[in-house]
């Protein structure tokens, strides 16, 4: 509602023209994709792992050689688009570190050359275990952005990614608590739990 009032006021002040309309549409789109809502999970428990990104869970796989530690684990694939909130949030209270950040192309994710796209591996390490989050940018977006490395609280904002694919690697001492096809909200949706012992 406030955005609508602001938009109408802007149109009345500057006069309505086609170029004014285009600027208004662009301005509204930028406000929409950069929205930054508060997120508090009412389902999080001790040992819970939250989704770091908004999107839809496309695949859950068991893997033999996890990039976390080379041991068996789980791989979760989440697709996010322009309609999803682009703010990234820490899945666990931990020490955050960027293992790899490769600037690259912004090709369509259906392209056979999508591996040339910009990508980043972000590791969250805690006493209970580590979570590795791999972001792969899609097309028509902007570069990945991250905050400072170091201590982060669960659900704390740590970066920005608009339109892409995120792969989450969970260690063997965890269990997955969601199903394929589920919509996820960063900092709210519980995707798994650490077991009592690492």
Image: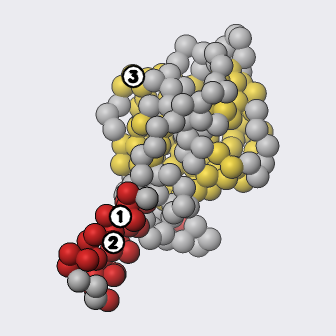
Q: Do the residues under discs 1 and 3 have CB atoms within 8 angstroms?
A: no
Crowd rating for badge 3 (residues with CA inside 10 Å; few <14, some 14–19, many 20+):
some
Closer-to-camera residue (101/38): 38
Give the secondary structure at mark 3.
Answer: strand
Can residue 138 be seen in this snapshot? yes
Closer-to-camera residue (68/94): 94
Closer-to-camera residue (7/183): 7
Name the mark on residue 46.
Answer: none
- Number of the front mark, 2 or 3: 2
Q: Distance between the residues labelled 2 and 3?
A: 43 Å
Q: Do the residues under discs 1 and 2 have CB atoms within 8 angstroms?
A: yes
Q: Name the residue under label 1.
A: 5
Name the mark on residue 8.
Answer: 2
Is 153 situated above or below 135? above
Name the quarter where the C terminus is drawn. Answer: top right
**Residue 138: where, in percent of width, then height?**
51, 64
Q: Mark 3 points at which residue?
A: 151
């Amino acid at each position: 509602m406030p955005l609508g009032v602001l938009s109408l006021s802007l149109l009345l002040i500057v006069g309505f023209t086609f170029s004014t309309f285009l600027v208004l549409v662009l301005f509204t789109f930028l406000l929409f994709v950069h929205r930054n809502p508060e997120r508090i999970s009412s389902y999080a428990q001790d040992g819970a792992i939250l989704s770091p990104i908004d999107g839809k869970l496309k695949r859950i796989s068991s893997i033999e050689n996890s990039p976390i530690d080379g041991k068996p684990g789980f791989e979760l694939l989440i697709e996010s688009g322009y309609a999803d909130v682009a703010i990234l949030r820490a899945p666990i209270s931990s020490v955050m570190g960027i293992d790899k950040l490769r600037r690259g192309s912004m090709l369509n994710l259906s392209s056979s050359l999508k591996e040339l796209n910009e990508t980043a591996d972000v590791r969250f390490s805690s006493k209970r275990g580590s979570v590795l989050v791999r972001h792969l940018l899609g097309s028509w977006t902007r570069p990945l952005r991250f905050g400072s490395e170091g201590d982060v609280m669960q659900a704390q904002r740590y970066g920005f990614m608009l339109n892409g694919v995120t792969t989450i690697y969970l260690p063997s001492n965890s269990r997955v608590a969601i199903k394929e096809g589920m919509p996820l909200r960063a900092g709210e949706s519980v995707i798994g739990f650490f077991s009592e012992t690492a």
